[in-house]
Amino acid sequence: GVSSAASDVYKRQVKDLENLPMVEKVIVGTPVMSERDIVDDSFSVAFTMIFKDEAALQAYNVDPQHKKSSQRTLAHVVRGVIYDYKSQ
């Protein structure tokens, strides 16, 4: 797993992305361990980012600060999953 110190650094770096103008909110957390088979608690850190619209998401994807942050943090990622979805 990830050390506590590395996890704290990662969480701060992700939360700092909330300072980008196209990012409305960043929620960072850790898993709730569960006995239920359907629950995936195999991760160390998860985050949700909220954007105003798809244009804001696209702007984020090409933003230099986002790309720099991704390069730093992806070195610590063993398995990453991204879901881009629209609120209904």
Image (tube, rainbow, N blue to C red):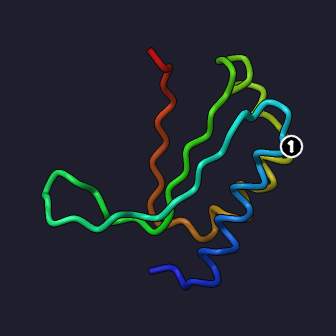
* In the rendered image, the vertical position of residue 83 relative to residue 77, given as above or below: above
16 over 63 or under it: above or below: below
Image side of residue 39 versus residue 50, left or right: left
Q: Which residue lies at the image location 31% right of the left edge and 63% below the top edge?
A: 41
Q: Quadrant of residue 61?
A: top right
* The C terminus sits in image quarter: top left
Q: Give the left or right position of residue 64, taking residue 86 as reference.
A: right
Query: Which of the 4 image quarters holds residue 4?
Result: bottom right
Residue at image point 48% right, 25% down: 85
From the image, tell me which residue sits under label 1: 64
Q: Left of 24 or right of it: where is 78?
A: left
Whole-percent x, y for residue 24 in the image: 72, 33
- Amino acid found under the numbered disc labelled 1: Pro
Is residue 81 found left or right of 25 in the rendered image? left
Q: Nearer the viewer, residue 70 or 49?
A: 49
Residue 19 location, x and y as percent? 84, 45
Where residue 72 sits: x, y (%)?
74, 64
Q: Residue 29 in the image: state x and y as whole percent.
A: 52, 60
Q: Quadrant of residue 70?
A: bottom right
Residue in view at x 69 percent, y 21 percent: 52
The quarter of the image holding the N terminus is bottom left
Q: Secondary structure at mark 1?
A: helix
